[in-house]
Each structure stands twice: as C-alpha cells, then as structure tokens.
Amino acid sequence: MLRLVQPTLDYIDTFRKGISEIKENRTPYDLHSVQQAISFMDNNFEGYWDYLKQKQSDNQPEGYVPSTCLWLMNDNQFIGLYDIRHFLTEALQKQGGHIGYQIIPSERQKGYVKEGLKLVLEWCYSNLKLDSVLVCCNQKNTASYRVMTSVMRELGGYERPVIEIDNHLECSVWINTKKQK
C-alpha cells in the first residue's frame, strides 16, 4: 500500500538503500534534501535528523521557508521523498514552488510519483490548509512535467506560461489540493 510517512528510524535500512541508489544514479534534478541525505550518509547520518527538524522550524535563514519532508513508502519499502514548502517567497513563486519530489531510480516510471503527488496534495490541504499548490520543473524534465500537468488536469488548476530563469526554461502549474466538483 502506498503511503506517506514522516522520516523515521523504523525505515532507516530501506531509506539508506534508496539513497545509495540515487547516489549511484545522480541527475541534474536531484532535490537539495536528497543531496543532503547523501552527504550526511557519508559523514554523519545522525545530522540528517537535525537537518530535517531545522527545515520545519519557523526560524529559517533569509530566503528560505519552513518545509516538511515526507517519505513515500510502498508497504515498508522506501520509494522516494517529497519536500513540501509551507508557503512561497517571491523567488519560490518563479522557481521551486511548494513541492519537490524524487523517486528512487529502480521505482521510476511505475506511477509512484503521480500517486505520491496526490497524497501530498491531500496532506497540504489537511495540514497546511492550502487550497492549491505550485509545482515547478525544468522544461527538460519531461517526466516531471507530464506528472504535474496530468494531476493538474485531474484535480483542477492551471498552467502558467513558461519562463526563462537561471539559463533554463521553467514550467509551472497551480494544482488544486481537492478535486473541484
């Protein structure tokens, strides 16, 4: 059964295995939190838990916002993770949005990211009281683009015009957190 969980030591072995798989198959689209997990795994894994707690704090450095990391699990196997920003700065409204996600390489192209995104949207509605969220991706990341526009069409929302930012084209969609009647 597919579900979201708060990061926990209960699933540390499957998480480490998944992060190792990502480390062996790096992409230009790896999430910052995944890069941090890789770094902590190599040096000081206990520091990863402190990092996750700090991300949720209201006391963030300038330009950062509180965020929550959730792990996507299929039964007791780590599949990927979602980073959820609690609100947006002006910069995040252009690039980054509310939600970032990454699925481990061996579990890609199986529909997990789409189903996980729907679970995250429910979480955003229930926990952050957001009626809609912004999801962004590099235009070259066609898999992510297909997922976010598919969920947008299913739940409602709209696609924004593509913009050029940091020498690439950025696609973005606002997605309703609840299906409109």
Image: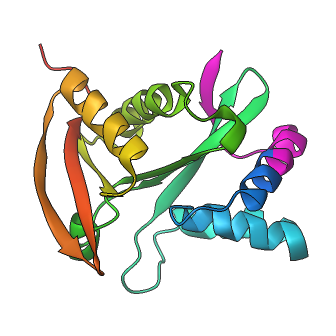
**Where's residue 44, x and y in %?**
88, 74
Colour scheme: rainbow
In-image side of 161 versus 12 (left or right): left
Q: Which quadrant of the rendered structure holds the C terminus?
A: top left
For the point 50% across and 61% down, the residue is: 29
Q: 41 or 9: nearer the eye?
A: 41
Query: Is residue 165 at least partly visible in the picture?
Result: yes
- At a point 67% along the width and 43% down the height, the residue shown is 105
146 is within the stretch colored magenta: no
State which quadrant residue 94 falls in: bottom left
- In this image, 109 relative to 93: left or right? right
In percent of width and height, residue 140 lies at 36, 57
Left or right of 89, for residue 35: right
Dividing the image into 4 quarters, which one contains the N terminus? top right
Residue positioned 48% across, 60% down in the render = 67
Above or below, comparing residue 165 to residue 72 in the picture: below
Which stretch is magenta?
1-17
Q: Position of residue 171 (x, y in %)?
A: 23, 56
For residue 96, above or below residue 159? below
Residue at 73% across, 64% down: 37
Left or right: residue 180 versus residue 134 is left
Q: Is residue 166 above or below residue 107?
A: below
